[in-house]
Amino acid sequence: MAFLDELADKIDGEQELTPADLKSILELEDEAELHRLYALAYAVKRRWVGCRVFLRGIIEVSNICSKDCYYCGIRRSNPHTQRFRMSAEEIMAEARWAFEHDYGSLVLQSGEVSSSEYVAFIEQVLRGIKEMSYGRLGITLSLGEQSEETYRRWFAAGGHRYLLRIEASDPQLYAQLHPADHRYAERLECLKRLRRVGYQTGTGVMIGLPGQTIDHLVGDLLFFRTMDIDMIGMGPYIVHDETPLAARMTVFDPDRQLKLGLKMIAAARLLLKDVNIAATTALQALHPRGRELGLQAGANVIMPNVTDTQYRPSYQLYRNKPAINENSEQSRLALEQSVAAIGETIAYGEWGDPRHFFNRGGGSRA
Ligand code: SAH
């Protein structure tokens, strides 16, 4: 426990955590020590961002994708994926549902497409959602790498947050996870573009990847700090058997993946303090209460799926994605109960922008 006593003193004294501290955090294994770690992170969360959960209803707009990432089930060359794109009317219906149920924000996520037709389609959808909700629904976009011009158009149309995971902040590890034409430098440049345009900018990584070491994860945490990121969306890697990376993950230990995911959340909260951190769906895929465990380790955002159930089976980034058959109303009620069970409340009707964005002088468009 000596390390955790030291860590607690450091946190009390508002001292910066060192890379060695982060490494020791990620190496903790003992259950009692892990509980203490989560409690320390929870106290920091309570102090910096409070204990209310912000919701972003996620709409999985399309699984059509130009990318061929080795880990992802909707990669371009997976012939078993039945491709779809929702119509503007279908997206609007789900956005209206989220609005009527007082979700503060939406996330529009899809595979990566950059055609001028798609850019205009998203722009039109954004304007439609803003108009329907009298400007009250906040909108996060998660639509991959795009030109600065596209990011500007979508920002002008009403998107104000953007989530683009770097996936692995180490260029060599990134190169092992993607074909040669997927460029790390371009993804990094996109994160800079997003900030320049004025988005609240989020990034993240997959945790527990083949070939990934604890030092890589420490590097990821330091990357979030160097990039002065506002929001973190990261989660455990989960095998999808129709992808090339599956062959490199012969043993899949869900417990290890879950634990590593929770430790990363706790470490990110202790290091970054005032950012928003999502308890992602991948945690829930590994444990029925995965997202609640994420909240207890320092996360403060949940992204409930509000996609029509007819499309959910086709948006399998990984196997056993939860709530594939559960409609949005069932998801909502289950979530409300489980959040209440850990003594937190859902901040209905609020955007829940990351404090960090304002603390860094990002300003407000609300
Ligand atoms: N096209 C968008 C969003 C795509 S999917 C983009 O490029 O940002 C959203 C996230 O799902 C990805 O960023 C990736 O980190 C995650 N993901 C994909 N396959 C996964 C897997 N097998 N296990 C866990 N997460 C995965």
Image: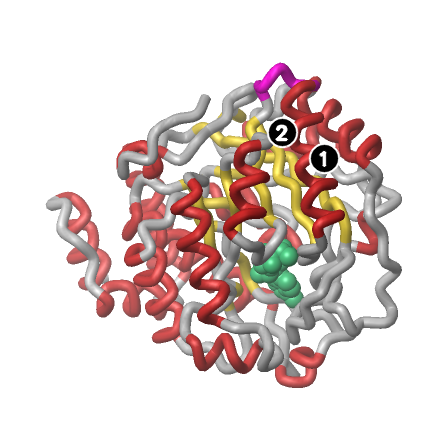
Give how far apart the Cα atoms at labels 1 and 2 are. 10 Å
Left or right: 284, with 366 as reference point = right
Left or right: 347, with 215 as reference point = right
Start-end of magenta stretch: 132-136
Type of secondary structure dominating the magenta stretch: loop
The residue sitting at the top extreme is: 134
Give how far across and how far down residue 8 sits, in percent. 20, 50
Pick the quarter of the image with the C terminus. top left
Task: Name the element at disc 2.
Answer: helix
Residue drawn 54% across and 82% down?
176
Three-letter residue code for mark 2 = Gln
Residue drawn 40% across and 35% down?
354
In the rendered image, which quarter is residue 199 located in? top left
Give how far across and how far down residue 291 sits, in percent. 56, 45
Left or right: 355, with 257 as reference point = left
Residue 133 on the magenta segment: yes
Residue drawn 45% across and 70% down?
185
Task: Name the element at disc 1.
Answer: helix
Q: Name the residue under label 1.
A: 331
